[in-house]
Image: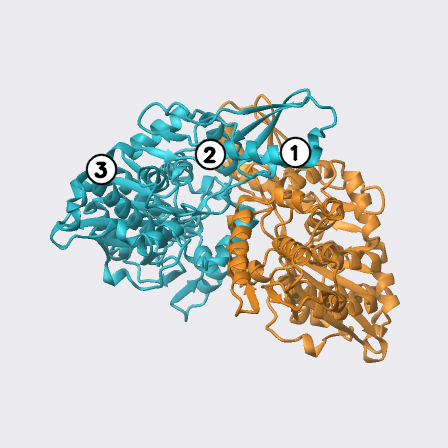
Chain colours: A orange, B cyan
């Protein structure tokens, strides 16, 4: 897996571009700085999809994607394989003029990432920057005005202090005739821009160069033109590009119009929308339309896994359908199901570190693996076991999952799902139980507690001594009723 | 300097307690996760102290202290010295039941801390927890109910998932007869509590132990009483203590009623109030009263430095009065001023790493050093140069700064300061300039821009072709006027 950082971004970009453009499909995964802003904003089985979108939006809007994974899968027919390349991007929002950027962390998310070896020092020191479209426009407008005084006026206090420190050091250096170069640890791109502008424009005998970690100042003989022609001089463009790095990847993904695959991909899509495209709209329909325009064909492997289990009730026995459990299943006890399915071959060059869950790059890779395995099982069901002896084509595989395109899984949702290219499905969820207490000896509070303890049901007060119970699915609904009945019997009779 | 972390807190606590209780005064410093929530919430020279308090409150309420420094200073009369011990605490808010804790970072603050070698891995993996009083009460009430079902119901989704994973591993382990111990990486204190409670209460042959990084489960012969009597068993108290560690230090500082010294200490006090005491009140007066009750005698070395410069105009020539510049001044060019002042002797054991600015522990130490130096200069001014030949007493030093107690510096404030033990001083700030444009040929926008470029002045629209200008001090106000006059002459005549 390639780790993509601010310092190696420019070097790796052609490889990424190439991998995306040659892929048959692309898988994605993201790690977040948090998911719940308020404890009260939890999901309920009584939610409609519209409710759910609104709750999720409220929950995530202060959080960000801190790591993004992309794996590209290219089919090689004669080898019965998909060749894959896998990239893991650390994303850090650098400070931009006119905007005081913040990162909010949920403490449990920090713990989670710590546990899975997220490297906070890489994130902070070498994370890749991004802008969404409104911020890109803001910054572009601002820079085309080219008014340095205006930029100076909008510096934060700390930036102002830092700039003053550099200016003092520069003027001391200018006064010392013996020293021809000065190197300063200027990392803030806006301060770099200001110092470039200021010194290049106002001093005939000084030239400036910079990289992501420092800036150097050179005393030159006054034929400055030579320097100016040798170097790229559009400082505004350089500054803008340094902020736009991951946005460029996002635009590449979208414009490639390749299939996008992810596991439980709704939150990833919502975060991507707000972070690289536009703030999330209030309207759920507008959100769906935007995503559909950006990514016309999306597959959710979590949704596929539910469908697969329906189809193969006899064979499939996984307890949960998390990404790791599915991957383990298809590579061990369930391997027979996808016998003779295309191998997944990782580009050797990019196979530098240990595979591990909850690293975005690897999770994207795992999602791609189970996508191929599941598509294969659907194919076997459709074309029969002849597939054990011949190589399945990429088009055959895709044709077998085609009907699940743009169907996106919703967590804790009564078997509902979102349909991104049309009307959402009519609910098939089990009806709610209405529980009415006639015997005055039954303690309603205790009963509600008992119901809640079932975990996969939600309880809502309805009227005097009445409440509603919603269950995740039809089986569960029956189980709750019989469990409750036994408990009541034991307790009161 | 001692680095105090969650893992060595219990070992170091007696030393800290001892140092605080034997000190003549204590210096503090804090590093924050951010200071500005909105770019618009900036300080203006038109602010009253009440305005300023409100703006600061709004700005900081989502941010936290991430590192806290304490240095204790004990006078040793015969050695003409202060012995000092210095502690640097990393503070991390662990996740508590009933509350989804968050950390917000301002990107520029992250950059600032990165640059000054703040260790994010220590912060995240071994930071010390704290609660303010309302959270302490919430948690205490909650734990005294001792209702495990209630605690389970309030777990976050991620915590629930993690718990399920542990429970699966435990039940698999229980089934394996050959294996007598199981160690799991349970770090979340609430999950530890739940697993302790659950397994100790429901299984006669299982005992549980834990430290901050893991939990171990032991199969025991059923005389459990033996284990129970050997170990501290009040799990609620253990859990509460693990959350209250830095709160204990805060209570120690406050109950010691020692002088507190800090450099530019207002923000530190506001953060301490919200993080370890109570959310900041709306009323500025209530805030002042609360702080005064917690810490009856506070000295702000920034305020002292302004007073000292007024007193020693001839000798003192520092350009800025930041902590680092003052410390450098008193240890180099300004050393003669505090000749024969008490030496500052760092406890050797705690002198383990390089002194550096913007590490909270060292900044507390530096603040203490310049406090002693400045107090000495005030003494020389009062008692004359005889002090060059005899040892000054601690009471003499304190008597010379006594009049500055509880006077707290305000940044960008027109020479105002806050008085924590009484009425705020009547303003001595320069009057505002009212600029009225009669000539229609003068471009008002350009003029306002020109005024703003002076940096240390603020401009506010007033009425048609009129605006107000506020300057930081009387000198500045004159400078602005003459600067403007010259500019107008050049431009229009």
Question: Alpha-carbon neighbours of circle 1 within 10 Å: few (<14), some, or many (≥20)?
Answer: few
Q: Earlier in the sequence, mark 3 or mark 1?
A: 3
Give the residue at mark 3: B400
Left or right of residue B348, residue A427 in this image: right
Q: List x then y, in percent, for residue A383.
A: 87, 67
Question: Alpha-carbon neighbours of circle 2 within 10 Å: few (<14), some, or many (≥20)?
Answer: few
Residue at mark 3 to residue at mark 2: CA–CA distance: 28 Å
Q: List x then y, in percent, for residue A380.
A: 82, 67
* Secondary structure found at label 1: helix
Between disc 3 and disc 2, the foreground one is 2
* Secondary structure found at label 3: helix
Between disc 3 and disc 1, the foreground one is 1
Left or right of residue A400, residue B146 in this image: left
Left or right of residue A25, residue A435 in this image: left
Give the residue at mark 2: B475
- Which quadrant is home to the N terminus of chain A? bottom right
Identify the chain of the residue marked 3, using the numbered disc in the image: B
Q: Residue furthest left?
A: B78
Residue B156 lies, with reference to residue B348, above or below; the image says: above
Mark 2 in CB contact with mark 1 (< 8 angstroms): no
Residue A313 versus residue B153: which sits nearer the camera?
A: B153
Residue A56 lies, with reference to residue B406, above or below; the image says: below
Identify the chain of the residue marked 1, using the numbered disc in the image: B
Give the residue at mark 1: B489
Identify the residue shown where x is 46% and y is 56%: B124
Residue B276 versus residue B338: which sits nearer the camera?
A: B338
Q: How many marks?
A: 3
Identify the residue shown where x is 65% and y is 33%: B488
Residue at mark 2 to residue at mark 1: CA–CA distance: 22 Å
């Amino acid at each position: 897996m390639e780790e993509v950082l601010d310092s190696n971004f420019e070097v790796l970009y052609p490889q990424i571009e190439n991998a995306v453009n040659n892929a048959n499909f692309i898988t994605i995964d993201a790690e977040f700085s948090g998911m719940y802003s308020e404890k009260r904003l939890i999901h309920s089985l009584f939610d409609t999809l519209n409710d759910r979108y609104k709750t999720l939006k409220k929950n995530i809007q202060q959080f960000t994607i801190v790591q993004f994974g992309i794996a590209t899968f290219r089919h090689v027919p004669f080898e019965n394989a998909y060749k894959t390349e896998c990239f893991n991007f650390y994303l850090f929002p650098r400070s931009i003029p006119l905007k005081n950027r913040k990162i909010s962390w949920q403490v449990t998310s920090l713990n989670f990432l710590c546990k899975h070896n997220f490297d906070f020092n890489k994130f902070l020191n070498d994370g890749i920057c991004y802008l969404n479209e409104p911020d890109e426009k803001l910054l572009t407008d601002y820079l085309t005005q080219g008014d340095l005084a205006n930029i100076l006026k909008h510096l934060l206090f700390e930036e102002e202090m830092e700039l003053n420190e550099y200016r003092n050091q520069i003027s001391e250096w200018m006064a010392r005739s013996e020293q021809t170069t000065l190197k300063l640890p200027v990392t803030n791109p806006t301060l770099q821009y200001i110092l470039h502008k200021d010194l290049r424009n106002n001093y005939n005998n000084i030239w400036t160069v910079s990289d992501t970690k420092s800036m150097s100042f050179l005393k030159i003989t006054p034929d400055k033109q030579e320097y100016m022609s040798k170097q790229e001089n559009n400082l505004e463009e350089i500054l803008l590009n340094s902020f736009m790095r991951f946005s460029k990847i996002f635009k590449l993904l979208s414009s490639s119009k390749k299939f996008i695959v992810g596991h439980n991909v709704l939150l990833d899509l919502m975060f991507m929308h707000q972070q690289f495209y536009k703030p999330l709209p209030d309207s759920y329909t507008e959100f769906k339309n935007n995503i559909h325009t950006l990514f016309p064909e999306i597959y959710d492997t979590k949704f596929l896994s539910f469908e697969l289990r329906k189809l193969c009730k006899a064979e499939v026995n996984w307890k949960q359908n998390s990404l790791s459990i599915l991957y383990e299943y298809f590579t061990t006890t369930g391997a027979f199901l996808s016998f003779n399915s295309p191998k997944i071959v990782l580009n050797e060059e990019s196979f530098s570190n240990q595979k591990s869950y909850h690293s975005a790059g690897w999770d994207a890779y795992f999602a791609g693996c189970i996508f191929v395995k599941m598509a294969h099982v659907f194919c076997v069901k459709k074309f029969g076991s002849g597939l054990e002896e011949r190589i399945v084509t990429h088009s055959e595989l895709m044709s077998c999952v085609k009907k699940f395109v743009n169907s996106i899984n919703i967590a804790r949702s009564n078997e509902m799902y979102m349909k991104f290219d049309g009307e959402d499905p009519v609910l098939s969820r089990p009806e709610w139980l209405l529980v009415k207490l006639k015997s005055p000896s039954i303690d309603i509070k205790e009963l509600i507690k008992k119901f809640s303890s079932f975990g996969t049901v939600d309880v809502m007060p309805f009227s005097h001594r009445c409440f509603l119970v919603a269950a995740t699915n039809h089986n569960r609904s029956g189980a709750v009723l019989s469990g409750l009945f036994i408990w009541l019997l034991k307790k009161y009779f």
